[in-house]
Image (spheres, coloured by chain):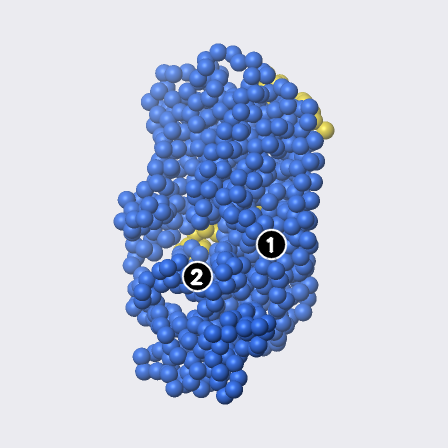
Amino acid sequence: MALIVFIVFVVLVLIVSSRAGRGKTATSGGYYAANSSIHWGVNGIAFAGGYLSVASFLGIAGLIAFFGYDGFLYSIGFLAGWIVALFVIAEPMKRMGTFTFSDALNKNYNRPGIQLAAGLSVLVVSLVYLVPQMVGAGVLVEPLLGIPHYIGVIIVGAVVIFLVAGGGMTSTTYVQFFNGGLLLTFASVLTIAVLVRGVDTTDLPREEGPRGLESYRFEHMALSVGEEGGIHRESLAQTPLRAPEILTTHVEYDEYTGEPVLRLYQLSRLIPAEPAAAGEYTARVKGRTVKFDANRVEEVDGAPFVRIEDWWRLEQNPRFLPTGTEAELREAQSITTKPDGTQLVNGVEFGLGAQTQLRQMGRVSDLPDGEGATGAVGPIGLLSVLSDENTSIQLARAAGFRIDGGTEVSVYYEKPVAGDEYMRPGMRFPVIAREGEPEITTRLNRLNFISLMLALFLGTSALPHILIRYYTVPSAAAARKSTIVAIAGIGLFYVLTMYLGVGALVGGANNPLTDNMSAPLLARSFNEPLFAVVSGIAFTTVLATTSGLIMAASGTVAHDLMVNLVRREIPDKTKVFAGRIVAVVVGVIGIGLGIAFRGVNVSYLVGWAFAVAASANLPSLLFMLFWKRTTAAGIIASILVGLVSSVGLILIGPDMWGIYGLDPAQAPMPLDQPGIISIPLSFITIIVVSLATQKEKPQQAAPAS
Amino acid sequence: MAEDRPSAFEAYERRKVRLGVRLTLLYAAVYAGFVVLNVFFPPIIQKSGLFGLNLALTYGLGLIILAVVLALLYNWLCGVPPTEREEG
């Protein structure tokens, strides 16, 4: 059912979009700029549809569901950059360019070097931004269609190539327009549903669905603590657990204070079984009915039981314990992989793949007034309840380690936090100094955050797939109006995203394996058709953003790089043909990168794309517009320095060091986010080089004003 | 292109650029204040803001609303060019 709705939905959007582009791609003006005939209202929603990538829709909702307020910080940065786009970039870009960002930059200079450098920059930024979109596509399609990640990436890549190479900018515009409209509509529908449902600490959906990602209320039981802070074994025997034995203990300590921060126990215990078909028994494991062979069954007092090994967490913080309770044992989930490759999910060998068998996590366990449920609640009321210091929230967290014999263990547990901690900075971006943390670590953490927020603010208006959309409207005024529509639409969407994130938390709709599925799973917590439609929208979101990026890369290669490398006038039809070929090539490269970068955190990659765009493109754009002494050499140097420094700093940063398999602490560049260094460096370069090359006169007055 | 247009239009364009730069600087200052508060003054950002929300949420939502308000204000102040009507 969900699959059919999903396929019908995506095919409909594709048919309508590709029909819109039919017959409008014969000329380069039609192929690259939709003949500048798009209405500003449509263009504004298309701006939103192209800009709101999976990082915004799936990524931010998931970050809010898992990390609270810090996910919202991304929203603020992603929107704030549009102010720069509207007030200083939109209208000059439309007036000065024809098809690409390089056109505008080169307008007053007519130097092949500018077009080559800008073209190269557009190509790099497009590819860097393309990677997380492709990775996200695979993550999305994998559970939905039950196909491997790489096939998901290939499907998305093939559809986008078909769309862009066939319908050019007109088809791209309409895919983005439909996507923008659908995102706003269904984010509003989900938000209303979240508010009507309110917060319920007692009643979570428990139906068993075909994919087994539904919610489950984890068990917890009081016990006392032994001398060393661990479980008191005698009190363990008095819990409702039957014949429990501690097999393994895993304790994690705070790296600065040395205090234990996480105590996990692998318990062996008996659970009741029932005879089923011949030679088989069934038992309930984490609320799920599982079949067992008869040889696994033990008779105790005449009743059948099976022994399973699963993981539990010890909670000792009085803030999150019932009054008078010293400690509680709280049920967790686990995936264990033995050295011979055997995988157990929650202690049971399902043989169906791990991802389909874990329970969803995340919930509100206590409300401020001690009530069980709020009932329907207003938009401010919901946020107010969730940020209350007396609200208790259970967040999904994971711990990975090895136990004896080389078995790899991943434990997924509920981490309790108070509402005021959930709605303040610090869980994702560690900007608040922890006890005993060295000052240098605090400073680096803060610099990383400032660097990211700077890149988001300055990078938005320099993203290639945003810049090309200024050429699809007929005039500068239309460019301005469409940017205002985009700001209103994107601003509204980011407010709604907050509710999608907290709705997924409140509804227990988080897959503990990934923070990218919270929005579709939130939809599923209401009903299956809504899940299918929201998954379809997530898929069209990937299509919308990737088609814009491939379009930008195609335009810049065919229009900027090829013309300057060939160094002679190319016929219009050849330019369009070259654009189609480049779209195919870039799409195939994107598919390859999407497969290669599987598993890399997509939000980092998106942050990097903004940093590269802000470093390579924005300084030259701003100085070309506002500083009369800017020279062609200054522009070229600024683009190249911004590009090389930002990409170079990423490559020698801690995240990449980790990807290389090295110790991130030993990385030559201590920051993950390069913007705070590479952006000023690019600004300084354009000033210094322009001043040093003042003899070189531009062909016309530089400033657009 | 701006260079070919009558001087009244150029004056209009210059005024618009000045307005755009000022509004950008205004928003950048408010945005920078938000980042600085989050990074360096966590106890302040956790204090009560409006409507029962903390300052962190109030300020963040306020930034989104401010962006939309400034965008509409800019469009209104830009009005129609004095010598040309670029489009309806």
Count of numbered tags? 2
Q: Position of residue A197 (x, y in %)?
A: 67, 65
Of residues A147 and B21, the one drawn nearer to the viewer in this rendering: A147
Q: Earlier in the sequence, mark 1 or mark 2?
A: 2
What subunit carries mark 2? A
In space, the residues marked 1 and 2 are separated at their CA atoms by 27 Å
Q: Position of residue A76 (x, y in %)?
A: 52, 49
For the point 46% across and 30% down, the residue is A123
A442 over A6 or under it: above or below:
below
- Residue extending furthest front? A278
Q: Position of residue A683 (x, y in %)?
A: 39, 33
Assess disc 1: are there few (<14), some (14-19) or many (≥20) residues with their C-alpha within 10 Å of its C-alpha: many
Location of residue A284 by image quarter: bottom right
Of residues A347 and A340, the one drawn nearer to the viewer in this rendering: A340
For the point 55% across and 67% down, the residue is A363
Q: Which residue is mark 2?
A: A343
- The answer to whether one can see residue A91 in this image is no
- The amino acid type found where label 2 is placed reads Gln
Closer to the eye: label 1 or 2: 2
Q: Which residue is mark 1?
A: A520
- Residue extending furthest right? B88
Assess disc 2: are there few (<14), some (14-19) or many (≥20) residues with their C-alpha within 10 Å of its C-alpha: many
Chain A representation colour: blue
Q: Position of residue A619 (x, y in %)?
A: 43, 32
- Residue extending furthest top? A568
For the point 34% across and 49% down, the residue is A658
Q: Secondary structure at mark 2?
A: strand
What subunit carries mark 1? A
Q: Secondary structure at mark 1?
A: helix
- The amino acid type found where label 1 is placed reads Pro
